[in-house]
Amino acid sequence: MPKDGMNPIEVADLGVNNQIDIDPTVAAGRGFQICVHGRNNHLTIGADTVLGGGMIELRNHDSSITIGSNCNLTGTLRCRAVNSHIRIGRHTTMMGAHITLHEAGMITLGEDCMLSGDIAMDVSDMHSILDRETGERLNMPRDILIGDHVWLAQGVRVMKGARIGQDVIVGSRAMVLGTIPAFSLVVGTPARVVRSGVTWDRRRLQPALDPIEPVENVIQSASATESRSES
């Protein structure tokens, strides 16, 4: 049975020899679209995953999208080129990310990642930059790898070739280029490490406070001080 407010999964398979493996416990929000074109593509969605809104699209050939169990995803996942692949680990959440491959390659998100809204990533620049003399293309596509338990805040851009280690926090509006070491807090454009040795928690934990001294102790201390002053 679909979860409250959710709908059964509907897939438009418009291609040939595509494989669709969606666990029966998966549910989608109203209007969520899954479209598979081309041939020899493979879509896998694990148990108890919720697709809140958006779309999944396999537009070409020999491509795949694999989503682990217990995910909650809102946004777009689009493999638009031959041999393009997306992997999302279990327990990952998205509130409005756009993950796209306009050229062959792989985008991997680890387990228990948390992606906020207005996030974008692609293995491609989508157009070619050429050496003027030789005509050689200079901006070839490059894979993106995001480790386990990574938090991407609002508006982050993850550029082609990025490597983000586990437990990283990427601040709002940052642009990630190159390699980010594990257990780091990064901000800015391009993103730079501002603190190391950190992790994060989905819960809003209360700050650690000093123990409150009992009122009677405070009163006794004040009385003793007053007595010494009078003597």
Image: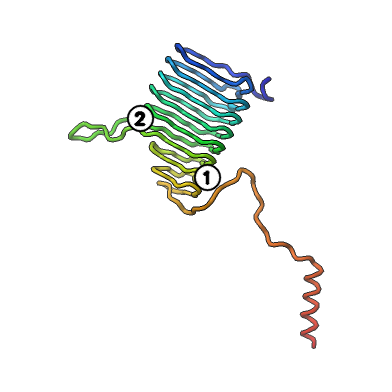
Q: What is the total number of numbered labels drawn onto the structure image?
A: 2
The residue under the point 22% across, 35% down is: 131
Q: Which residue is mark 2?
A: 126
Task: Name the spot of residue 204 as percent of width and height, x first.
Answer: 64, 47
Looking at the image, which is closer to me, 197 or 226? 197
Figure check: 181 above or below 75? below
The numbered mark, 1 or 2, whose residue comes first in the sequence reads 2
Look at label 1 and name its amino acid.
Asp
The residue under the point 55% across, 24% down is: 45
Figure check: 33 above or below 192? above
Direction from residue 27 to residue 129 in the image, left or right: left
Direction from residue 31 to residue 18 in the image, left or right: left
Query: Which residue appears farthest toward the bottom when viewing the image?
Result: 231
Direction from residue 30 to residue 126 in the image, left or right: left
Look at label 2 and name its amino acid.
Met
The nearer-to-camera label among 1 and 2 is: 1
The answer for how far apart the CA atoms under marks 1 and 2 are is 30 Å
Looking at the image, which is closer to me, 196 or 131? 196
The crowd level at tag 2 (other Cα within 10 Å; few <14, some 14-19, many 20+) is few
Task: Name the spot of residue 211 as percent of width and height, x first.
Answer: 72, 62
The residue under the point 53% across, 22% down is: 44
Task: Name the spot of residue 171 as percent of width and height, x first.
Answer: 50, 46
The local secondary structure at tag 2 comes to loop
Q: Which residue is mark 1?
A: 167
